[in-house]
Amino acid sequence: MSTSIQQSSDASIVSQICDTYKLTIAEFNTLRERSSAAKATAYCPYSQFRVGATLLAGDGSYIDGANVENASYPVGTCAERVAFGKAVTEGKKGFRAVAVATDISPPASPCGMCRQFIREFCDLSTPIIMFDKDQAFVVLRLEQVCTLLVPVYLPSTDSYTWLAHEAYNARSHHESRLSG
Amino acid sequence: MSTSIQQSSDASIVSQICDTYKLTIAEFNTLRERSSAAKATAYCPYSQFRVGATLLAGDGSYIDGANVENASYPVGTCAERVAFGKAVTEGKKGFRAVAVATDISPPASPCGMCRQFIREFCDLSTPIIMFDKDQAFVVLRLEQVCTLLVPVYLPSTDSYTWLAHEAYNARSHHESRLSG
Amino acid sequence: MSTSIQQSSDASIVSQICDTYKLTIAEFNTLRERSSAAKATAYCPYSQFRVGATLLAGDGSYIDGANVENASYPVGTCAERVAFGKAVTEGKKGFRAVAVATDISPPASPCGMCRQFIREFCDLSTPIIMFDKDQAFVVLRLEQVCTLLVPVYLPSTDSYTWLAHEAYNARSHHESRLSG
Amino acid sequence: MSTSIQQSSDASIVSQICDTYKLTIAEFNTLRERSSAAKATAYCPYSQFRVGATLLAGDGSYIDGANVENASYPVGTCAERVAFGKAVTEGKKGFRAVAVATDISPPASPCGMCRQFIREFCDLSTPIIMFDKDQAFVVLRLEQVCTLLVPVYLPSTDSYTWLAHEAYNARSHHESRLSG
């Protein structure tokens, strides 16, 4: 299992990944494009952290979602749950892949709450494709996404900033983020 | 402010309600039919309590949702939040009405978490139309829906049953459910 | 029902409030002091918005809580739910009052999710005492706390700031915050 | 990594486990007894599924919690989050172990939402000790608890029952529950 970041522009890698996860290259590209585009539909005035998600259902259709936050933080809904809520109530099933896109690098993985939500409707072998700000990606099966969203609070700094967030993520990548 | 249950078949009442809340009769009927139909799309194996929700957006479109539950109860999403998640990420705004349909009577009101979610996107004057199992209804403005989903646990019974739930709701209607 | 802000230093007002809500002045003062002190126990690196909560149980004991946030915003827990989670699992019941303290003015009310949580364990007549940054306060019964936490996103500004938050709250106070 | 169920009565196994996870036998036993006892403090009229949780903090103290459910399922709080909410606001840190006890076998693991909550305050190497109905147990590090709470909905049955739940869990144990 590799957790290194792959380039979407590397046709050889993409082809190999698609083979492993039983996706066509067209499907992979659609997941990449739609999840990245879905970021623009996020309502995230509180975190200013946009997340887009796209599901590939068993009937070949795609369902998009993005995070919808709330003034009371715990009331908000993550991108993955918005997409699955829409998909499930529209009768979709047999999900073949879940794509998640954010504006950071390395890419963010679904939070634990979302993975619990996804598990209700997906086999543990379902691929979770995580795209970073440049559409480079990491792909893991649901059962492999052991890591949890890391805390971004830095006790040594006075204020929390996205710069710090990115620095923290970059620093912690090999330690904990995707290698879990 | 009346919290008594109105009959959808009473044209005079419906007409008067529509006038008060600035809805056409066709819009009211569509909200009633769609929210009731949306119940069939619920994924609620844990509570077996189906909820359908339909929003009327400012552009005249309707957006449906239903509850999507999870083996870990707190991870599930209510019907109203599924519908708003879908609507907001699809760019809808200026919501003119929220309809919620359940299989009990008197009709259930949105829970506190959902009303917090709704508040993020709706004026306090937005009508919340609650349909019961027979499509009879109660309508209140968001600011008037003070009541919260009542606990259905009955300490005096050994086991919790939906019969008890309905009996409790019937009993508590005038005391607390919609008269808040 | 008055929603104007009262001064904790005004003995006459406090006495009258205590009479209305069946609290002793000592109980009121303890709720004020403990909920304000509880703010210091918050874990809120993401919002930097501290909330303290204190419950007065039927046996005369006090239970404190504060918000505990998470890198994944929806996973965090508000102050009121931390306090009630602690209280309920410690066997407390018959809650006579709920105090909530924040660093803004006018004081914040419990969010909809928390009011739903509170409703499970409290009568609708239970007083919710909301203290502002200077321990001035507003008190309402659970059934009267119709207002929901207002969204703090200001579409007309490029960036979200707490200054804006406070300005928004101040501006919207008479319109929607506590007059609901 | 073994996910087989261990007997708490097997002194040799317990000793070996304690050595691996840097716990004393007294600490292990206290975690077992307290988490099992904490089940009795659950408020779970909706699921009737009791969960107890006990944390061992860096200062040697223990903090208990249990699930506190709500009529609106998503509003409830799991045992682990109740315990951590209490612990964090009481200034506890440096958590050395998390114990979770339920009434089923094999033992249940924390749901994804709780693992996300735990991650905020614990290293990935923190042991999660899961006790079953007879206090037999499975222990894994936070980073190893890849599995998510499995859906208990059985499409082939007309009604959901706890008997079915237990049968399902028993059946799926080696496939997915703890071997993830």
Image (tube, coloured by chain):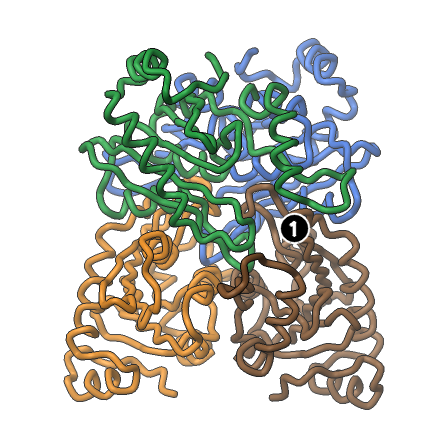
Chain colours: A green, B orange, C brown, D blue
Q: Is D133 placed left or right of A155 in the picture?
A: left
Q: Return the x and y of residue A151 as percentages of the image width and height.
A: 64, 36
Query: Where A146 falls versus D38 (above or below)?
Result: above
List the residue tagged with mark 1. C89
The chain letter for the residue carrying disc 1 is C
Picture layout, residue D70 above or below residue A80: below
Q: Residue at x 56, y 34 (%)?
A: A149
Count every numbered label the image shows and give the total: 1
Q: Is residue B136 above or below residue D157?
A: below
Position of residue A28 in the picture relative to residue D175 (left or right): left
Where disc 1 sits, the SS reads helix
Front residue of this view, candidates A149 and D67: A149
Q: Is residue C124 above or below residue A35?
A: below
| Image quadrant containing the N terminus of chain B | bottom left
Residue B18: image x %, image y %? Answer: 24, 82
Residue at the image position 32 percent from the left and 60 percent from the top? B92
**Tag 1: amino acid:** Thr
Which residue corresponds to the image point at 43% horizontal and 21% vertical from the top-left?
A140
Q: Quadrant of residue B124?
A: bottom left
Which is more toward the observer, D103 or C167? C167
User: Where is residue B20 drawn, in percent x and y?
Assistant: 29, 86
**Could one spot residue D30 in this view of the protein?**
yes
The percent coordinates of residue C77 (x first, y second) are 61, 51
Give B141 or B48, whichever is nearer the viewer: B141
